[in-house]
Amino acid sequence: MKTKPFLIPTIIILIAGLAFFVRCKTTLKTDSSEIAQFLNKFNNSINEGNADTLMTCFKTDKKTKALVRLINLLAGKKGADGMKPLTTIKLDIDKAEIKNISNDLVNVTIPASFSHATVDDKQSVLILKIYKVAPHELKIIQADARQFLTDYLAYENFVKSKTEAGKVTYSAITLAAFKTADQLKTRYDSVIWFAHLHTQTYFYVIKGKWNIDKDIIRDKDSTIDPYKMGLVNPDLKEIIPAEYDLIHNINGTFTGLVEVEKNNKKGFYNLNGRMVVPVDYDEVFPIEDENNLAVLRTGSDYFYLKKDTTVSEKVDLKISDFFSNIKNLTHSFDLYKNALSVVTEYNSKNNHNAVYIPPSYLVELNMISKWENFKNPLRNVQNVDDDFTHKNYEVKYSGNSKTGDNWLEASFYSIRDYFLGGRSEFYDRKNIVIIDKKQNRVFSKEIETDYSNDEGSGSLGGICDINSIKVLNDSLFEVKSTAVLEVQMYDSTQNITEGAYYHYLSIKKNKLIELPNKRTFGFTKYIKMDDSYLSACYNLLIGVGTYDKRKLKTIDHITPEILKYMKNEIYADYRYQFNDKRWQEIFGDTGLYNRYSNTPNNANVDDSLTVIDKYNINWINHKLKEVKPNTLAAR
């Protein structure tokens, strides 16, 4: 947040002026009770807004402008701009750190907080030096308010930007929920969300310390403060005890049920407070089936959750047997409708979004993050853009791809994520779900779709929409999927804007890992090429000038121009120093070349080239009919 221009002179005056010190000489000893009494008097004057009494706490020969401004600020009389301050200042005297400098001089560091109804509080600190000038008389002889004022001015500007830019209109049910949530704070440490089902409101309560950014996405290696989550019904009765790591949205997985998680195990409660499914299962897959609601997995054992919500005996199942019946995985769907079927709001007058905690299986299959913010229909917020607020979220099923012997099957999904603000109206990405029928396991991986320089704002045109998988061995797969590209050809009138991008996925420690690759044509790194790699769909932008003056052409094969780029990209991967300035220019704009240095890179990279690199260079040279014996130098 930029500081507003009219505040800059005031900042300089206040910070420069508030380092005054009056030297006194005394042999009087200061005790802790006197300091506590003095600090309470000082704080009471602040709370009462009494500037005159505050001034008497300072020992100074004259009332400097800097001191007067600080006192007016603390008393809530005038802000740094001379107007009535928007921010409330509170000092936590009880937590003040007192350090003795001498018998009659102490340094006091007082925690301070700034608050406003529309934004979260901000913490700071005010440092005072207090001197005993006479028996039973203490005075402040120095105020180090540099950090205090810097923090205050930043916070005041932030408050102004929020209050001036966006006025909020709350629905009646939201305002009522705020009041009820305040009542519940006598029983719980915090109330973080409330959910509205029809005309009734349910409350997500916390025992312990809660931080959504740290706690909801639990990293097994991270240290978090202990907390437990529960759910309270409209009658303020606890229907889900506060002993869970996460409670999902009401009706999010099944109508009338609430999914809960504890120690990475899942289960369900109904809205009467009865545990319907014990919290014992590793995965829950809702299915479209005549007799059953879901398949439950714990370890290698599978069970059915029947429509009467009873759990069957162990059944002989493999994931490939029911994957095609898993809800939402064989057709496209709009997540926004699901997210707002029951509106769950933040218990905050700063965060106005609706929070969505999706079914766990959609998270585990990489369809959506563990929590998301959606536009809240119960609050009207004017003129506020938020990069992290969804106005829609569409998942499009793109079909599946099977291997020749049918032991592996991959399903592809295109996800278009719409935002209220940000660099682009929407973001595209893809996801692949792989079923390993041999080992009875499922893997999921996000597939990047944008390799341009537009920071993720590019969008697929759909002309070359390709999704396929090829098995290289039992634990290595080649995935070909369309992506937005920005590849300059040697001929400066040709650019590749969209086409096939190759990903190499390996199974390591029962996880699907993408092998590292900086090349646009990744197969030159991992595969000995054959003619099958010459067939590919690419969009070429041809011509010069602005986009509207250039021609878009779709090709279904690799051209000699692309082959030349492909070969030299291998060299660029090893930071080869090209003699040709055009190749220097091309690879200087990619992540392969050292674009930040004008010094030469590697004059020769022959020793770095792998067997596959050398094979592919020779193979490309042969295709270009430019083979020279015993030569691997780039041209």
Image (cartoon, rainbow, N blue to C red):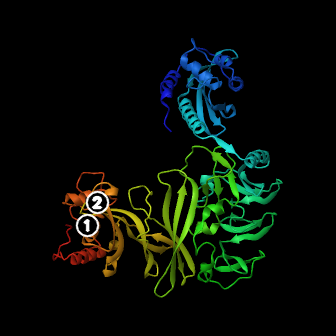
Label 1, residues with CA under 10 Å away: few <14, some 14-19, many ≥20: some
- Label annotation for residue 568: 1
The amino acid type of the residue labelled 1 equals Asn
Q: What is the crowding at mark 2: few (fewer than 14 residues within 10 Å), some, or many (at least 20)? A: many
Residue 140 seen in the figure: yes
Q: In the rendered view, would you say 34 is above or below 633? A: above
Residue 201, quarter of the rendered image: bottom right
In the image: residue 528, left or right of residue 186 = left
| Structural distance between the alpha carbons of marks 1 and 2 | 9 Å
Q: Is residue 431 left or right of residue 600?
A: right
Q: Is residue 339 found left or right of 419 in the rendered image?
A: right
| Image quadrant containing the C terminus | bottom left
Task: Give the residue type that dot 2 points to.
Answer: Phe
Relative to 84, 179 lies left or right: right
Q: Looking at this view, is 183 or 140 the one in front?
A: 183
Q: Marks 1 and 2: CB-CB under 8 Å?
A: yes
Label 1 sits on a secondary structure element that is: helix
Q: Residue furthest left?
A: 629
Residue named by callout 2: 587
First in sequence: mark 1 vs mark 2: 1
Residue in the picture at 62% in, 45% down = 381
